Amino acid sequence: MENFASLVPLVILIPFTGSLINLFLGRYLNERMIGTVASGAAGIAFVIAATMTFAMPRFGYEGVVVNPPILDSWLYIPSAALNIPWQLRVDTLSLTMMLVVTGVGTLIHIYAIGYMHGDSRFARFFVYLNLFLGFMLILVTGNNLLVTFVGWEGVGLCSFLLIGFWFDKKHGVGWKNSNAARKAFIVNRVGDFGFLMAIFLTFWTFGTLDYYKPGEHIPGPVHGETVTIEPGAVASSDTHGASTETVTDKGIFGKAEDLLAEGGHIVHFGPFSLSLEAVLTIITLFMILGVTGKSAQIPLFVWLPDAMAGPTPVSALIHAATMVTAGIYLITRNSVFFHAAPLSSAVVTLVGAVTALIAGFIAVGQWDIKRVLAYSTVSQLGFMVAAVGLGGYAAGMFHLVTHAFFKALLFLGSGSVIHAVEHGHHHAHAHGDHGDQGHEEETPFDPQDMRNMGGLARKMPITFWTYLIGTLALAGIIPLAGFWSKDEILGKAFNGGFNDGKIEGFIALGLLIVAAAFTAFYMWRQIRLVFLGKPRTAAAEHAPENGALMTFPLVVLAVLSVLGGLLNIPLGVNIPLVPNEILTLWLEHSVPYTKGLEFNFLLAVTATVIAVAAIFVADRLYSPEPLTKTGKDKLEATGLRAYFRLANAKLYWDETYFRLLENPYNRLSKWLANVVDWDWWHDRFHNNVIRDTFNRLAGFLANPVDRGAIDKAFLRLGDAVAAIGGRLRGLQTGYIRTYVFTMLVGALIVIFLILLPLLRQAVGR
Amino acid sequence: MEPKSELLVTLTLFMPLIGVIPILFLTRGREARIKWYALGFSLLTLGASLVLMFSFDSSKAGMQFEHLWEWFQFGNFKVSYYVGVDGLSLLLVVLTGFIMPLAILFSLDHVKERVRLYYAFLLLLEFAMIGVFVAQDLFLFYVFWEVSLVPMYFIVGIWGGEQRIYAAVKFFLYTMAGSILMLLAILWMGNHFGTFNVQEIMSAIQAAGATNQSAFPVGPTELLLFLGFFIAFAIKVPIWPLHSWLPDAHVQAPTAGSVILAGVLLKLGTYGLLRFCIGFFPKVSVDVAPIVAVLAVIGIIYGAWVSYAQTDVKKLVAYSSISHLGFVVLGIFALNSAGFQGATLQMINHGISTGGLFLLVGMLYERRHTKDINAFGGIWKVLPVFSGLSLVIALSSMGLPGLNGFVGEFTILLGAFGSPVLGFWFTLFATAGVIMAAVYLLYMWNKVFMGEYKQPAEAHGHGEAHGESHEGHGDAHGHDDHGHGDEVDMEAVKRAYPPLSWNEATALIVVVIAALVIGLYPRPFFGYMDASAGALAAEVQRYVPGQTTVVQE
Amino acid sequence: MQPPTVPVENFIILSAVLFIMGILGVLVRRNAIMIFMSVELMLNASNLALVAFARQWGDMGGQMTVFFVISIAAAEVAVGLALIVAIFKTKKTIDIDELNTLKG
């Protein structure tokens, strides 16, 4: 494995190289070459990751730590006992993520060549996209929290760049895009704050940030069959001399396991002394803050819907399939910590479940095709988070993988729709009114508004059918991928509640089932609005199907959305040729405390019935035409008007944040800057207090003191001198004889004084 | 120590001063060459400092390349020319050598008045700043400290903005006020220890400390001396709330002045804190560390907050310095090796990234003659290279991992967290400052580079529009009359935003490369500091009551 | 045999007489040239005293001093007369009572 694993730096470097090539040479290349470079980089990375995956079983599924060449260490401070290397880790978990990232990534790259055709910054788009892949791969392969954090922030940067990609659009759209990008970055930063705090706590608790040291085995009970390691594998690792030695220096998880097993450990942090369990709870709680930022959970999910300002491939890749799942990856990676902190796990579960429900609810009331999907993504991420909170690490990862397939599919499908409607719009206008190029348009045409669509199924059959598959997969209709993964999460919640007696299990089960119903409902509403019925605008009427570059990825992803469920068929369901629980068993080798799940037939039936019922209700409601005559949603015509409006207004979540956080922050900032710092401290204090006091003091010294007293005293002195001089001037006659006479008298007096003692002597004698 | 290397520090120190000579005596009519001489000598200084760095033995904690020469003696006071570098000052010398060519590179295109004097002052300033970093004699240190004031005073006062005189005087007086106290403290020290030799004083203090005695008289003397040094340094840093001179000086200074001010001059204060306040008064430092750290954390948050509200780009960057240097001070008063090293590295990082930010603000100003944030917009579209480079610089300033700022901030915060005198809450609030850094920097970047492109109103056909009055109010709807055409008038754009000159591009690229190198591979930089910082930390830890590190039982 | 020596007192008395004559001359005369000559007289009086004492003590320092005085007096005469001529040229008089510009 060592040999194969040492390829992992390449997996990261190749996308970066692609990025650099397009950055420096992009202006000399045409679109096809740029696209080839970028997609090629992603594809090669995928191939390498796949190679490593296939090599894994031969080497006993053992995780391997890889030191990249050249950059042997990063933060290395011996005197502070700090050593954080640029180490990478290849194990089943990171490989799973690598495969998803590069696999889905490659498809989306290909799609983007078609989607971005003709854009003035075509090359730059692929620069960012490849850069994103590189950072995402760093995130999932890092062997310590800090390298993960590098990727974590790096993908945040790329997300920022790509959301704001169309920063220069007219009519204020550009500003909206820019602000959405900024919002994403800053909200993520709030999460990163939590991540950083978790890192500090971890470091000072364990003295290292490494997940595992080289050669270390994962801690905790490993379930499932024991793996027989082939002799060749052992021999090959022996040559490197690491694995056979007993590892004394362990990474954070090994140490945590050991210390927890011993029990009774107290950690001192300056003023605090806490039990190790409490410290782990705090660490994980901070981590959760990071997760809510990156994976768009309550309370930090607000950035993701706005992030739809980016081009659609970006929404598919970053804001659906990969980056936003980083939080789930992080929790899974730190499963040892979360396992030891039941409180945090409960919080994770509740956050996930509540997010799933609320986002699902909001999605019902959206008009923008991508916003629906965005809230859907938030909701599905909530499912995953709830799953990992319940200890269903494999379930969460499973849903992560399948969701990557069908949500990427849906986003790309929506992109295809938008692209087509935009074309249709131009087409309609080019033919509609000649001469006047549509300048008088009052409100610019919004190709993403579902009210402008309708009846696209006939115009764009491939898009429609793949979209339908994605929808059904997302809704959890058997036998598509989403059914299996969602069912496993519900099963986890069911088990958590009924078997383990966890209160959050019950809550999560209830919330998630309702959320699943919402999912089916809003997705079917979307199908109805976009593809069925009659075209509602000229643009929709003229929308053409897109080229193969864009439809090919759709087909591939549709196939994956159908078959994805085979990755982890639960125990109790037998499908010929497909073993059960492939993913769970695979992940067990790197994620401690991963447990498989028996298929719960009753639950599966219940969930499916609810989903089908929701689709049925939506279909009834939104057919034959989804809008009322006045262009309103059919829901508004029912008694649920208030709820629809609430969902449409996103529960006033953004407004509340604006009122509670942003506005006070801005106003405090202005107040501090203008009033406190400038008016008061800079102007008032320094000018009035210091300078004026100084001036007053100087004035006091100058006028009363200096001129009044000291000056006057000296003037008097001068007067006196002048007066005396006036008297004495009479002596100065100007006649030499006077002077000589004076001299003579003086000399005589001197002589007399000299002679005086002699005279005295003479007299005395 | 062999005599060859002994002169290395002296050589580095005097190189800029040597450069002043040809500049001052260059015959008239050859002024065009002055800037090349200045650039050449600043590069020679950089070269000398790099030689110094590469021949530095990073395994030793003490001074290296010491050069001691008895200067004069009066009464009790023995003054010597004594220079040397250790791990903590070495990188700062290199930083000085690094920043100065950048400042000159920028000035090549943009400074056209009184060139001779300008470059002479720049080199003189470099001489003084290096002097502060290498002086190992308190008297000498004080001389350099004061000398560094003078050129800066004139640079701000002659080539500055509209209120340059006010700013220069304020800068001068503020700093002087602190220096006077320091002078008193220095004289006291010289009298008490019978020498100004820093190393001798330090070893006397350490020897006393080793036997649990104090080298100072009982009573508040030690605290007062500490304060004497501290206030001088705190003003220079500036530590909140002594920062009021900074926005004035930064905003009014010419670009090169701001670059040097942020890049190096502020580091004189933090370096002084580390070398003298901590080195001479470890006991007091331990006692006051929480108080100073509170000021530092307030500075971090306050600076970030105030910075966010600025509409003047340069002022925004200026206030960000307060926030960034709060991190440095926090690291210094974490009083452990990680804190010291993080702080020192962050001094370098701040020099690079804030220096870079000032450079790019300067480049914007030279194009548009305004610093109003609302006058810009959409520059990314018209100057992609410039915008890309400046994005990297902004990101490095806000501490994106993989770039230099993160390495320093992370190490500082880690040190502060593990510090026996600080700990959890300090780190919590300081880390919140990291979020806020993103808030103001992205605000700035957003406003200036993103959004719709805003074509400035042209005065009379020519792009040299000095009038700022009409430009600031262009809003998002300013282009409606141009219809829906996506094309902007490229000729007008070229006039408003001429592309980067080679000199400008070089300066920015160098900054970006430095940011990347330190961010990706800071090991050698920590390597230079490790021994010295570790020794200093060990010395200070002696005075820390109770357990010294965070451990688990 | 040594020639009979004149006692030193005689020289001193002569010197004193000459000196007093000089002082009186300076005090009484108004003609600058006369005053000048009186000054010379005083100088020579002191010269005489110096030579006398030199002989008395057998110390040649006094005689040496006299030579200096004589040569300086010569120079002084030159300068002094030049001054007087210059004053005469401008003021058309050498009556010192009329030359009282320094009067307070």
Image: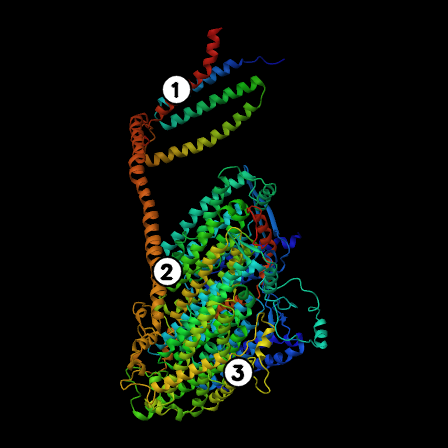
Q: Position of residue A467 (x, y in %)?
A: 44, 87
Q: Residues within 10 Å of mark 3 (few under 14, many from 20)?
A: many
Q: CA distance from mark 1 to mark 3?
A: 134 Å
Q: Quadrant of residue A472?
A: bottom left
Q: Quadrant of residue A51?
A: bottom right
Which of the marked residues, 1 or 3, is nearer the chain's N terminus? 3
Residue A96 vertical position relative to residue B150 in the rendered view, above or below: below
Name the chain under label 2. B
Residue A110 vertical position relative to residue B3 in the rendered view, above or below: below
Q: Quadrant of residue B248?
A: bottom left
Q: Kindly state the secondary structure of the residue where label 2 is placed.
A: loop
Point out the residue furthest to the top here.
Answer: A765
Q: Are marks 2 and 3 in contact (CB under 8 Å)?
A: no
Q: CA distance from mark 2 to mark 1?
A: 73 Å
Q: Residues within 10 Å of mark 2 (few under 14, many from 20)?
A: some
The circle on residue A479 is none
Q: Kindly state the secondary structure of the residue where label 3 is placed.
A: helix
Q: Nearer the viewer, mark 2 or mark 3?
A: 3
Q: Residues within 10 Å of mark 1 (few under 14, many from 20)?
A: few
Counting labels gives 3
Which residue is labeled 2 in the image?
Answer: B161
Which residue is labeled 1 in the image?
Answer: A745
The circle on residue A565 is 3
Q: Amino acid at mark 2?
A: Gly
**As rendered, which of A676 and A293 lies closer to the eye?**
A293
Q: Is residue B159 in view from this perspective?
A: no
Residue A71 vertical position relative to residue A47 in the rendered view, above or below: above
Q: For this view, does A267 lie left or right of residue C29?
A: right
Q: Are marks 1 and 3 in contact (CB under 8 Å)?
A: no
